Image (cartoon, helix red, strand yellow):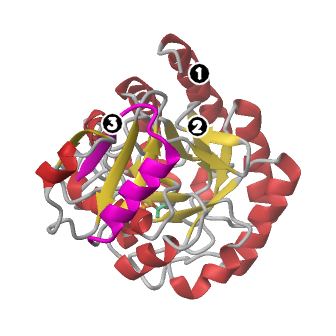
């Protein structure tokens, strides 16, 4: 349920109204816009009499929200959310580009890639230290050493770092990581989502391999319901009958999400297509679709990469992609 308040309501009247609502069970989520204040009522609203609320003098209008996701719903918070990373990158305000290797492999690799992507205009550095792999025999990341190397690359370049948490058992190693990535395979790890709701770190929530937009938003709601609304959604392709690409990039989810939620949405064309030559056209398409940013896998030697080499672009190719992206951002006024 959302309650739109009248303008210039006094603090005393607002406090009394809030007390009245809370006494009936629900919690209140405030969204203060330029002209209106919206109260989102979350939790059990069954005891609330909508007609009674409508008549109260502080209330302009009130309506029930049919969707099961509330805090992340745009009806609760009509303005776009801006997620500040490391005090400097504002995702949702300016087009954000997260770039770097699938996995951190060595100091030389991560520093070289970090320096190159920064020079090309990337705003954050990615790198997996813990890798979720389909095969137990595949490279599963450098783990805590990988995090250390990312921090080293941050020291050299100043780029905030993004890395995937694959298990809550490792969460203490992520204290200095700027954005915690929840991978596609953990999108419905509800214990992990709830736990991440208790911190205030930005969370990059990837879409599950075969999840609907609503399921994805419900996962975001898990994090938000715990109190952490610093969430960035990332479309990374879904499973369909098509086998010509690794996954099918569902770009239409971008305008769909823009209607449904106030959270920023970025696009990962690398995992979506699985082939480096398709990353450039899909990056361009993502800008025009209205996405707030990109996540692109870049490796200094894709042919030797320990993970996802086929979809990794070289730093030179990334330079060309960024030229296109920045040009399109200018045309699109972003
Ligand atoms: C990744 O970003 O390297 C990754 C494993 O992505 P996803 O969870 O989308 O497969
Ligand atoms: Mn990868």
Can you identify the residue that label 2 sits on?
96
Q: Secondary structure at mark 3?
A: helix
In terms of sequence position, does the residue under pointer 2 or pointer 1 come before the other? 2
Q: Position of residue 331 (x, y in %)?
A: 50, 11
How far is disc 3 from disc 1 in space, using C-alphas?
21 Å
Q: Quadrant of residue 19?
A: bottom left
Can you identify the residue that label 3 sits on?
258
Q: Position of residue 204 (x, y in %)?
A: 50, 57
Which residue occupies the foreground of this view, 263 or 136? Answer: 263
- Residue at horizontal 52 percent and vertical 15 percent from the top: 333
Q: Position of residue 156 (x, y in %)?
A: 87, 51
In terms of sequence position, does the residue under pointer 2 or pointer 3 come before the other? 2
- Residue at horizontal 35 percent and vertical 34 percent from the top: 6
Q: Which mark is residue 92?
A: none
Beta carbon of the mark 3 residue lies under 8 A of ligand 1: no
Q: Is 174 covered by the magenta stretch?
A: no
Q: Secondary structure at mark 1?
A: helix
Mark 2 or 3, which is nearer the eye?
3
Which residue occupies the foreground of this view, 260 or 293? Answer: 260
> Are the residues flagged by discs 3 and 1 in contact, CB closer than 8 Å?
no
> Are the residues flagged by discs 2 and 1 in contact, CB closer than 8 Å?
no
Q: Secondary structure at mark 2?
A: strand
- Residue at horizontal 44 percent and vertical 85 percent from the top: 136
Magenta extent: 1-24
Can you identify the residue that label 1 sits on?
326
Q: Is any part of residue 279 visible from this angle?
A: yes
Which residue occupies the foreground of this view, 289 or 18? Answer: 18
């Amino acid at each position: 349920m959302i309650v739109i308040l009248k303008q210039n309501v006094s603090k005393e009247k607002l406090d009394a109204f809030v007390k009245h609502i809370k006494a009936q069970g629900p919690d209140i989520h405030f969204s203060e816009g330029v002209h209106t204040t919206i109260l989102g009522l979350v939790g059990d609203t069954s005891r609330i009499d909508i007609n009674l609320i409508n008549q109260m003098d502080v209330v302009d209008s009130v309506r029930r929200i049919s969707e099961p996701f509330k805090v992340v719903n745009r009806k609760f918070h009509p303005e776009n959310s801006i997620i500040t990373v490391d005090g400097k990158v504002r995702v949702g305000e300016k087009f954000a580009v997260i770039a770097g290797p699938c996995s951190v492999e060595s100091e030389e690799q991560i520093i070289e890639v970090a320096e190159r992507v920064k020079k090309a205009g990337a705003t954050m550095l990615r790198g997996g230290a813990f890798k979720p792999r389909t095969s137990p025999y595949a490279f599963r990341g450098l783990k805590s050493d990988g995090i250390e190397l990312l921090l080293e690359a941050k020291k050299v370049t100043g780029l905030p770092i993004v890395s995937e948490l694959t298990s809550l058992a490792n969460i203490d190693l992520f204290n200095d990581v700027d954005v915690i990535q929840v991978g596609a395979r953990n999108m419905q790890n509800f214990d992990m989502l709830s736990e991440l709701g208790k911190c205030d770190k930005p969370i990059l929530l990837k879409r599950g391999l075969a999840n609907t937009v609503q399921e994805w938003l419900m996962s975001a709601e898990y994090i938000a319901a715990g109190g952490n609304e610093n969430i960035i959604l990332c479309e990374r392709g879904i499973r369909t009958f098509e086998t010509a690409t690794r996954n099918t990039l569902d770009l239409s989810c971008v305008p769909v999400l823009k209607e449904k939620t106030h959270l920023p949405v970025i696009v990962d064309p690398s995992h979506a297509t699985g082939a480096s030559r398709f990353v450039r056209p899909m990056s361009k398409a993502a800008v025009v679709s209205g996405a707030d940013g990109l996540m692109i896998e870049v490796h200094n030697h894709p042919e030797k990469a320990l993970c996802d080499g086929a979809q990794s672009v070289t730093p030179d190719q990334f330079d060309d992609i960024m030229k296109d992206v920045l040009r399109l951002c200018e045309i699109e006024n972003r």
